[in-house]
Amino acid sequence: MAKETGKKLVAQNKKARHEYTILDTYECGMVLTGTEVKSLREGRANLVDGYAYVQGGEAWIDNVFIPEYAQGTWTNHSARRKRKLLLHKMEIRKIESKVKETGHTLVPLSLYFKDGRAKLELALAVGKKLYDKRQTLRERQDRREADRAVAAARRRSGQG
């Protein structure tokens, strides 16, 4: 069997970029059972309610929904169990010190396969206030309008 290469996205948490200001991102592995990996390979997972934390010098992720594998038997996993994250000890210490600061949290951004191994993109983030969310939406809308105006001007100059 040929070895998998490249990156295959399984799930993404688009809500996280709207709700939080991303300060730093980390790529980490996860301790998974066989049926979890098979379920992920089918492209089924949900990160929206997930959160991560550091406890006892280890990083954990909880409330990430990986549905039970359809062909699984008594070996099937529970869908929302807590899973251990695989990070270097120095990264865990750095994350732990940042999370102890007020307002910082760990949020899963995406779940993907990289060269055949399940990886999680984890973000160190700070929650946005309502006015920050509005500002972000306004900036995005202004950028879109400017791009449309430039594209319209190019079309007019190209035709005339």
Image (cartoon, grey):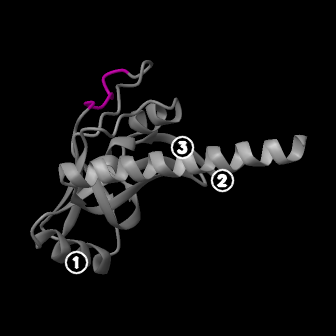
Q: Nearer the viewer, mark 1 or mark 3?
A: 3
Q: Are marks 2 and 3 in contact (CB under 8 Å)?
A: no
Q: Main secondary structure of the magenta part?
A: loop
Residue range highlighted in magenta: 73-79
- Verify CB contact (< 8 Å) between mark 1 and mark 2: no
Total numbered badges shown on the rendered structure: 3
Residue wearing tag 3: 9
Question: Element at badge 2?
Answer: loop
* Residue 121: percent from left, percent from top: 41, 56
Identify the residue shown where x is 29% and y is 47%: 134
The numbered dot on residue 6 is: 2
Give the CA distance from mark 1 to mark 3: 28 Å
- At mark 3, the secondary structure is strand
Callout 3 crowding tier (Cα within 10 Å): few <14, some 14–19, many ≥20: some
The quarter holding residue 95 reads bottom left
Percent from the top left, x then y, of residue 106?
24, 59
Q: Position of residue 90 (x, y in %)?
A: 29, 81
Q: Residue at x 52, y 29 (%)?
A: 42
In the rendered view, tell whether residue 43 sits above or below residue 23.
above
Q: Residue at x 36, y 46 (%)?
A: 32
Amino acid marked by disc 1? Arg
Q: Residue at x 22, y 55 (%)?
A: 128
The N terminus lies in which quarter of the figure?
top right
Q: Is residue 76 magenta?
A: yes
How far, Cα to Cα, is label 1 from label 2? 30 Å
Q: Residue 93 bears which disc, if any?
A: 1
Depth check: 103 or 106 in front? 103
